Image (spheres, rainbow, N blue to C red):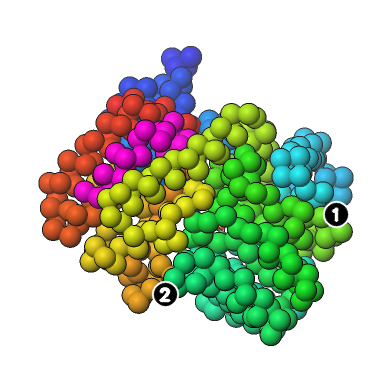
Amino acid sequence: MTASIDRPALPYAPLPDRGLFPDRGLPHPALAAGDPELAALITAEERLQADTLRLIPSENYVSSAVLEATGTVLTNKYSEGYPGRRYYEGQQNIDPVETLAVDRAKAVFGAEHANVQPYSGSPANLAVYLAFAEPGDAVMGMALPMGGHLTHGWGVSATGAWFRGVQYGVRADTGLIDFDQVRDIARRERPKIIFCGGTAVPRTIDFAAFAEIAREVDAVLVADIAHIAGLVAGGAHPSPFPHADVVSTTTHKTLRGPRGAMLLSRASHAKPLDKAVFPGLQGGPHNHTTAAIAVALREAAQPSFRDYAHAVVANAKALAAALLDRGFDLVSGGTDNHLILMDLTPTEVPGKVAAKALDRAGIVVNHNTVPYDPRKPFDPSGIRIGTPALTSRGLGTEHMPLVADWIDRGVTAARSGDEDALAAVREEVTDLMAAHPAPGLSLAR
Ligand SMILES: *Cc1c(COP(=O)(O)O)cnc(C)c1O
């Protein structure tokens, strides 16, 4: 079949069997012909994702099926409204696509209602504000530097500018949420909405404890499970239902779908949420994304996804243990989920310096504040790592001591400026990655 494709001259040398669609002979034939500059960048990104150890806890590898769904003609359609209630004709195929996604979301998470249209996690959270609060109302969430998300009322976000954000944190001695503090703040400030969940929370979220406080002050409890949705779907983290009124989640982190989001809720909250997403906040839904969300949810309902979710947690626990063995300081002393927050203060290597050195060693992490960080947010004391992506590649607990070793060698090399040591780690990383091909990518070396 490759014979029928016009092969344009490439500005780069294609390796054999390279790219997402090796059976087509070229990785992205139409792109390579029409926009070689962009095709080269995408191919380079495929190579980078294949060759590196990706430890960013919010990243993953989607399946080829999810990837294909995102690149379809569904992107050509306008579908403002909801299935059966559209403002455009020609929805014969789109309505069932969205209905499939909604039904699968409800089944996977045990929710009475699902809205799969939010463009991403931040707009999904904005819709919650629009549904349940008025500008100026108090809203409560975990402070960003303690592990919360910008959209939980932090000052630089619209949610902190238009609402009165009040924030809770974690205890300095344990790194854990102090529910006495959460209750005190909630009683004093009477927030309309309470968010639980975050972006750098290495421990199980106690949804029941939050629900009790929210009930007492008559607040809407929103469980933002963006990071842990895949663990919840796979039974590796307790479900926010029946405790939370609303569950907000991205679809592209541990859930392993396309970049997008969902709002799940009890039936009684369905109307205000749907109205807030459309027409309150958004126009036409991204149907190609909706289709890919449906595919990801079908995958999440398979027994193999439970294995993946539990393996993510087992890997994170094994990696945390191996890092502790090597003397590293972990916020809260370890992890219950997919995420580890390393406080590098004792190593005297700032988080950003460590992250950049590890990147040169083929290990991709992000610098991150740690609770009560004495350093500035742009130059914080920690790095944040996680195991979803490496688990999707089939790495297991037996590999985690090696990963911890690489991190140790990388941080040590960052301190001494030893570029040769970083290059040596990079070679080892590339070799292991070659032995564990990434889903969605079929790059030959
Ligand atoms: C990632 C994340 C978001 C935002 O998602 P985007 O798609 O990046 O807008 C919101 N809340 C939490 C807890 C997150 O981890």
The residue drawn where x is 17% and y is 60% is 415
Name above or below for residue 102 compared with residue 141.
above
Q: Where residue 142 sits in the image (x, y, percent)?
A: 57, 70
Q: Amino acid at mark 2?
A: Tyr
Q: Where residue 175 sits in the image (x, y, percent)?
A: 47, 66
Q: Amino acid at mark 1?
A: Ala
* Sequence-earlier tag: 2 or 1: 1
**Residue 222 visible in the snapshot:** no
Q: Where residue 255 sits in the image (x, y, percent)?
A: 58, 43
Q: Viewer-proximal residue, 29 or 161?
A: 161
Residue 208 falls within the magenta-colored stretch = no
Per the rendering, the mark at residue 372 is 2
Q: Where residue 136 sits in the image (x, y, percent)?
A: 70, 84
What's the magenta region? 390-409
The residue drawn where x is 33% and y is 22% is 16
Left/right placement of residue 394 relative to residue 132 reads left
Name above or below for residue 415 compared with residue 305.
below
Q: Nearer the viewer, mark 2 or mark 1?
A: 2
Q: Can you tell which quarter of the image residue 246 is in?
A: bottom right
Q: How many marks?
A: 2
Per the rendering, the mark at residue 189 is none
Estimate the spatial distance between the alpha carbons at disc 2 and disc 1, rounded to whole Å. 40 Å
- Secondary structure found at label 1: helix
Q: Residues within 10 Å of mark 1 (few under 14, many from 20)?
A: few
The residue drawn where x is 62% and y is 75% is 180
- Specify the quarter for ligand 1: bottom right
The residue drawn where x is 27% and y is 31% is 431
**Residue 111 visible in the snapshot:** yes
Quarter holding the C terminus is: top left
- Secondary structure found at label 2: loop
Per the rendering, the mark at residue 267 is 1
